[in-house]
Image: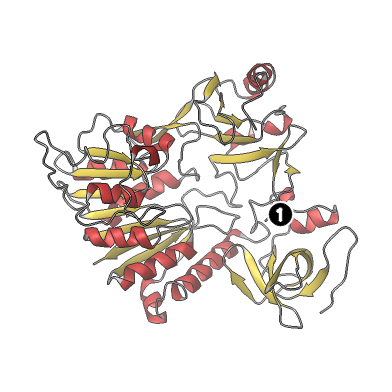
């Protein structure tokens, strides 16, 4: 097995990965047949692997390629980000940070890998037959105007802060913090903030956002607890001065402490970003959700609209709607004679959407968990989820059932006390988090019997699971396309259209 021990590090193996797996890992086997998930390698390479998880009783081990003995033709001569370069970090006795786990390979190779992984998950968990995959031909493609090295695309990023008050990131599956002085995947407006030179003592997390509008970037800092009364004054004296010197148009917001509810405090500029695509605009509060890739909104809007195939006067359900990126385009398409119901669980992001669409009477913004919201709006079709003790939940206000504009019950109520049914949606659009929609939500969508479902996914494994559930109900997949919205990482976005 060629197992050796290095002082202060995990044991090392010489391995040759033979396959790619979801999550940014290659798959290799020891001479004894034990599976090892290896990061920072490529299939066919012979690499020295430093094990990071190697419990004797474990079914598989994990490790990083720290030396390339026989390299792939797709391996870059230089990794675009030294802090994420496993080989370079190993030579300095350090671990690579996460965030660019495929950066050692060419961008074209990265897309080949993502396409392959997507096919394998759809054929495995998703249950699609080879001939079905052949007909659908899902391929992962780049976004327009992509940087040749896959850099400078992130308009959002977050960092931890170490005990010295310096921005830091974690190695894969580690609680250890590694100080970083740059993050080249970020757009220039964020890199130019030069946060590595800022004094961030008293802060545990920093979130940065670069808007598509004319305003400068926004910096949101989070304190570890609510007991540091002097923190705002120290930030005014230190971080505000730093931002004013590097980006005078920037904004600085002090969020509530971790685990504490409260309103953020604007210390500099304003507490939100203004996003724009064409003639559409959105306000996104500090900490609110927006697509990360700089070209994602302008790329996704026409694709979602085309996939939805809506006509004026129809009803569309927009699930996990965020600040309303797709809601705006869908509302334009169906017009005032139609209806859009947007459901979002985040109080901050849902409030942003409610404010954005406050003057559009044919748009309803519903705040709450998706399944509970659907059960409130269409109780005759969707069963309310069971509570902890088996009782059907009624979606109380305390569980997040209230909305900025109207509650779920008011969405269905009339002045005479009767509950006129809201028309079942003609189309459902959903963009869930990485956990996917899940069985209960897929079943609820099926119960509403729309004509079409448009599913945008950021995780191909949970997408494959949900598609298997849709197919169990008799739905057919009409199209699948992959988008490389996260270059130099293993993540990808997948757009799927289903019909009954």
For the N terminus, which image quadrant? bottom right
- At 24% from the left and 38% from the top, the residue drawn is 363
Rendering coords of residue 58 (x, y %): 70, 72
Q: Which residue lies furthest to the bottom in this view?
A: 32
x and y percentages locating residue 79 in the rendered image = 71, 54
Q: In this view, does 164 lie above or below 175?
A: above
Describe residue 452's horizontal placement relative to residue 440 as left or right.
left
In depth, the one of 52 and 416 nearer the eye is 416
Neighbour tally class for label 1: few under 14, some 14-19, many 20 plus, Cα within 10 Å:
many
Residue lying furthest front in this view? 389
152 is higher (above) or lower (below) than 391: above
Quadrant of the image containing the C terminus? bottom left
Position of 496 with respect to 166 (left or right) is left
Q: In which quarter of the image is residue 247?
A: top right
**Residue 143, relative to residue 259: is it above or below?**
below
In percent of width and height, residue 17 lies at 69, 74
Residue at the outermost right position: 7
Given residues 57 and 151, the one toward you in this image is 57
Q: Name the residue under label 1.
A: 79
Q: Is mark 1 on a helix, strand or loop?
A: loop
- In this view, the residue farthest toward the left is 416
Q: Which residue is drawn at 80% across and 74% down?
A: 14
With 182 as the anchor, is 464 left or right in this view? Answer: left
- Front residue of this view, candidates 244 and 238: 238
Q: Where is residue 410 in the image (x, y as percent from the top left)?
A: 21, 37
Query: Can see residue 456?
Result: yes
Q: How many marks?
A: 1
Q: In this view, does 354 lie to the left or right of 465?
A: left
Say whether residue 450 is visible: no
- The quadrant in which residue 177 appears is top right
Q: Which of 241 and 161 is in front in this view?
A: 161
């Amino acid at each position: 097995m060629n197992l050796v021990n290095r002082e202060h590090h995990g044991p090392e193996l010489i391995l040759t990965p033979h396959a790619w797996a979801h999550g940014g890992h290659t798959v290799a086997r020891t001479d004894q047949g034990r599976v090892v998930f290896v990061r920072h390698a490529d299939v066919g390479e012979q690499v020295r692997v430093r094990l990071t998880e190697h419990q004797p009783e474990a079914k598989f081990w994990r490790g990083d390629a720290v030396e390339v003995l026989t390299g792939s033709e797709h391996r870059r001569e230089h990794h675009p980000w030294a802090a994420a370069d496993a080989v370079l970090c190993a030579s300095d006795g350090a671990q690579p940070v996460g965030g660019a786990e495929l950066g050692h390979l060419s961008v074209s190779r990265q897309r080949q890998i993502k396409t392959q992984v997507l096919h394998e998950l759809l054929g495995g968990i998703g249950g699609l037959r080879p001939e079905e995959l052949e007909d659908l031909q899902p391929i992962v493609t780049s976004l327009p105007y992509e940087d040749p090295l896959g850099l400078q695309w992130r308009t959002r990023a977050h960092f931890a802060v170490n005990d010295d008050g310096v921005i830091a990131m974690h190695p894969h599956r580690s609680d250890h913090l590694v100080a970083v002085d740059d993050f080249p995947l970020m757009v220039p407006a964020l890199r130019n903030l030069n946060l590595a030179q800022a004094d961030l003592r008293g802060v545990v997390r920093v979130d940065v956002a670069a808007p598509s509008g004319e305003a400068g970037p926004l910096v949101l800092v989070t304190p570890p607890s609510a007991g540091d009364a002097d923190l705002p004054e120290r930030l005014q004296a230190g971080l505000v001065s730093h931002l004013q010197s590097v980006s005078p148009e920037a904004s600085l917001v002090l969020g509530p402490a971790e685990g504490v509810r409260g309103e953020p405090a604007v210390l500099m500029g304003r507490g939100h970003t203004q996003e724009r695509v064409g003639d559409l605009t959105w306000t996104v509060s500090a900490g609110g959700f927006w697509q990360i890739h700089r070209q994602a909104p302008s790329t996704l809007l026409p694709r979602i609209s085309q996939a939805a195939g809506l006509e004026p006067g129809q009803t569309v359900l927009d699930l996990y709607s965020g600040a309303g990126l797709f809601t705006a385009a869908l509302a334009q398409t169906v017009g005032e004679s139609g209806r859009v119901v947007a459901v979002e669980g985040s109080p901050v992001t849902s409030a942003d959407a409610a404010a954005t669409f406050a003057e559009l009477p044919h748009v309803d913004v519903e705040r709450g968990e998706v399944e509970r919201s659907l059960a409130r709006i269409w109780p005759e079709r969707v069963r309310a989820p069971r509570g902890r003790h088996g009782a059907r939940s009624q979606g109380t206000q305390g569980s997040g059932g209230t909305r900025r504009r109207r509650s779920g019950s008011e969405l269905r109520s009339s002045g005479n006390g009767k509950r006129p049914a809201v028309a079942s949606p003609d189309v459902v659009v959903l963009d869930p988090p990485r956990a996917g929609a899940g069985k209960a939500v897929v079943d609820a969508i099926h119960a509403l019997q729309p004509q079409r479902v448009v599913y945008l996914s950021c995780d191909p494994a949970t997408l494959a699971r949900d598609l298997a559930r849709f197919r169990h109900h008799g739905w057919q997949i009409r199209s699948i396309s992959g988008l490389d919205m996260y270059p130099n990482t293993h993540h990808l976005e997948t757009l799927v259209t289903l019909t009954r």
